Amino acid sequence: MPQKLPLYAAEKVRHAWLIEPLQHTLEVLRNEGGRWLLLATFAGEGKVRAEPFDAIELELAALWADVQTVPR
């Protein structure tokens, strides 16, 4: 768990998105009484609707469009 999530929970932040641009993933979390509930994990280049902004469609590819991958 990222180090800032307990601080966000203490400040009553309701949602958090964890973006891993090199892995092309987005995790959507909701704060439920101080505990983080994983709502969804999205990956790839598709279009998604993610809480709390689920009224709009988000193109995942836009989140990592400028990310340079490191060759293995």
Image: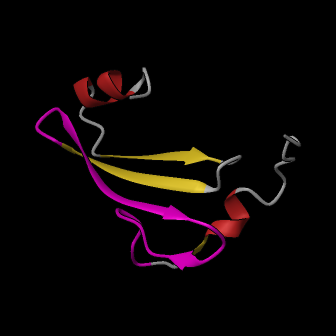
Identified at 65% across, 50% down, the residue is 23
Name the quadrant containing residue 44: bottom right
| Residues drawn in magenta | 32-55
Position in image of residue 28 (x %, y %): 39, 54
**Viewport quadrant of the N terminus:** top left
**Viewport quadrant of the C terminus:** top right
Name the quadrant containing residue 35: top left
Determine whether, in the image, residue 46 is placed left or right of residue 67.
left
Identified at 42% across, 23% down, the residue is 4
Determine whether, in the image, residue 63 is placed left or right of residue 47.
right
54 in magenta = yes
Position in image of residue 62 (x %, y %): 72, 65
Q: Residue furthest left?
A: 33
* 55 lies above or below 1: below
Identified at 26% across, 30% down, the residue is 9
Identified at 23% across, 34% down, the residue is 12
56 in magenta = no
Position in image of residue 10 (x %, y %): 24, 24
